[in-house]
Image: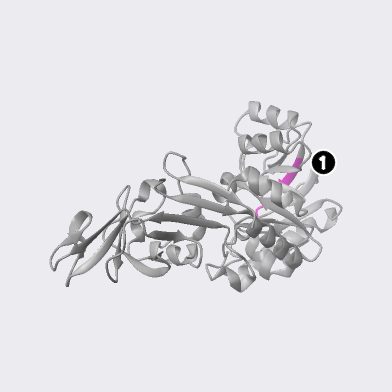
Amino acid sequence: MHRSELTVDLGAVRRNARTLLRALDGAQLWAVVKANAYGHGAVDVAAVVIDEGAGALCVATVPEALELRFEFPLARILVMGPASSSREVAEAREAKLELAVWQDEIPEGLRVHLKLDTGMGRWGLSELPTPGAEVVGLMSHLATADSDPAFADRQIELFRRATEPYSDLMRHLANSAAALRLPASRFDAARCGVALYGLSPFEEDPSADGLEPALTWRSYLAQVKRLEPGESAGYGRRFVAEAPTWVGIVPVGYADGFRRDLTGTEVRVSGETRRVVGTVSMDAFAVELDGEEPVGAPVTILGQGVLAEAHARVAGTINYELVCGINADPRRARRVVVDA
């Protein structure tokens, strides 16, 4: 028996892509599949979104793009992060990749997208130069589409004014949050990542925007024990029983991506909500039970109503970080792909 199992539902990814395409109302969907598609499997996800009509695949690095190029020889692939060496630039040229560029020197023989910094304060040009023949797109990135629409509107207007003279080029600015709720941001394409995987860019219930989580993470109770008053579970005695208490031990911990700061979150044991108690260990965590449960009882860590957004609130982080941090090493977890 595997310690845990990760199930990726490509059917959910497909339906999320359709939801985004409807929201985009004619603008192209460019699928962000960096970081192994946020832990969901870049090749599997790319195949689905291309089938649904995505206009391009977006990644952070040239090596990520090369892996996809091998599988999808005709796909449009944009590398949004910096090419780290002249060798990577040469590899990108040979593979017919497209690169985001924010420096004066533009690589020859490549299709490039000039990136303007409109307020993210990260990669980007302070002013947009006159695009040369190599330039096929103009882009920027929104800093607050999920949290401060007024600032996002200012970025949208800055981008519009700067790029209006070059509207014959592909213009793309929107991320998932903007694609769903800021129509003025959509331009010619939107680069959507988190929403494709059924995760809310607003840290709400994804169903509020018609999204369906694609990832389910399951384990089981490997041990069940009754603690007497004064007895504790886990390092540091952070959970001490005040009355006779049943606890179950799940063989998943922070080495698997179930973070140490998730104490207090809720999972489901045999379909019932149960609280994580005590200190999360490297390879195990404890849940408080209502009564004795059988060893082997199923535990749902994520999915089937257990939301990454809820875990993120407990950990003081975002859903992106949680799913990207899950360890899919086959020595620790079994990975299953379905299309339901």
**Could you tell me if residue 116 is visible in this image?**
no
Residue drawn at point x = 66 percent, y = 34 percent: 66
Q: In which image quadrant can residue 112 be found?
A: top right
Residue drawn at point x = 64 percent, y = 58 percent: 340
Q: Which residues are magenta?
A: 112-117
Q: Is residue 71 magenta?
A: no
The residue labelled by disc 1 is 132
Q: Position of residue 310 (x, y in %)?
A: 45, 67
Residue 49 placement, left or right of 324:
right
Q: Which of these two is toward me, 208 or 81?
A: 208
Q: Which of these two is toward me, 154 or 288?
A: 288
Residue drawn at point x = 75 percent, y = 66 percent: 22
Q: Position of residue 67 (x, y in %)?
A: 64, 35
- Establish if 339 lies above or below 243: above
Q: Which of these two is toward me, 112 or 71?
A: 71
Q: Amino acid at mark 1?
A: Gly
Given the current orientation, which residue lies at the most extreme front position? 294
Q: Position of residue 281 (x, y in %)?
A: 29, 51
**Secondary structure beneath label 1:** loop
**Could you tell me if residue 47 is visible in this image?**
yes
